[in-house]
Amino acid sequence: ETAEALSHHQGNLWLNGLTTFDKEVAEVLVRHKGGLGFQGLDTLDKETAEILAKYEGDILLGITTLDVVVAEKLSSIKGALAFDYLKKIDDKALEILVKKHGGFGLQFFSLESLNESQAKILSKYQGAVWLGNLAHMDDLALQALVKHQGSLVLGLENLNPQQINILARRKGNVFFTNPTAKKVFEEAFQLTP
């Protein structure tokens, strides 16, 4: 009854205090038009992921792990997929998201690292990629990632001269969530012929 009323809400619906919900509630909530947020939901089983896969809109999840089966289901969502607390991601799960998600946008707010292999996978994604809190990345991973054709949001804290050079040659938008890195890049970019 409450879920039914919420599904008719206009605009984004952030249910961040919700730590679990049953399949019946999920079936009702996927009818909502607008963004859905479940930051309090730290795990997601394949059955619930299959229901959420029917959703048409942006969705924010608080899950801390993402296995291949759940990634497969979530890749059907027709909207941006945002992972708020996912600190690590399996290469296979990432590959599934990149290949099967429709380019609506992938956001990883808490990734602690991105290796070269993962950067190569992510560079093939057709939509915007948000790595806004990823503070450090080695040069090889960044070199692979800049091949991504869509918008790229980075949270890098310190840019070394090699990374500035790598980013300066990139075709496509680069945005920085760290104001210091943004300033260093913009100043260096202006000096690049």
Image (cartoon, rainbow, N blue to C red):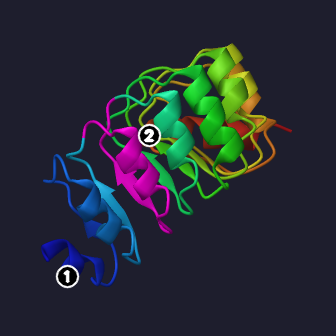
- Amino acid on which the number 2 mark rests in the picture: Asn
Quadrant position of the N terminus in the picture = bottom left
Between 1 and 111, which is closer to the camera in this rendering? 1
Q: Is residue 46 left or right of residue 148?
A: left
In the picture, the disc for residue 5 is 1
Quadrant position of the C terminus in the picture = top right
Tell whether position 53 is magenta. Answer: yes
Q: Earlier in the sequence, mark 2 or mark 1?
A: 1
- Residue 33's quadrant in the figure? bottom left
Q: Of the residues tagged 2 and 1, which is closer to the observer? A: 1
The reply to whether callout 2 and callout 1 are in contact (CB within 8 Å) is no
Between 125 and 186, which is closer to the camera in this rendering? 125
Which element is circle 2 on?
loop
Between 166 and 66, which is closer to the camera in this rendering? 66
In the picture, the disc for residue 120 is none
Residue 164 appears in the picture as rendered: no
For mark 2, what is the residue?
Answer: 178
Q: Residue at x 63, y 23 (%)?
A: 118
- Amino acid on which the number 1 mark rests in the picture: Ala
Q: Residue at x 72, y 25 (%)?
A: 120
Task: Tell me: residue 181, above or below residue 151.
Answer: above
Q: Which residues are magenta?
A: 42-64
Neighbourhood count class around disc 2 (C-alpha, 10 Å): few under 14, some 14–19, many 20 upward:
some
Q: Residue at x 46, y 28 (%)?
A: 67
Neighbourhood count class around disc 1 (C-alpha, 10 Å): few under 14, some 14–19, many 20 upward:
few
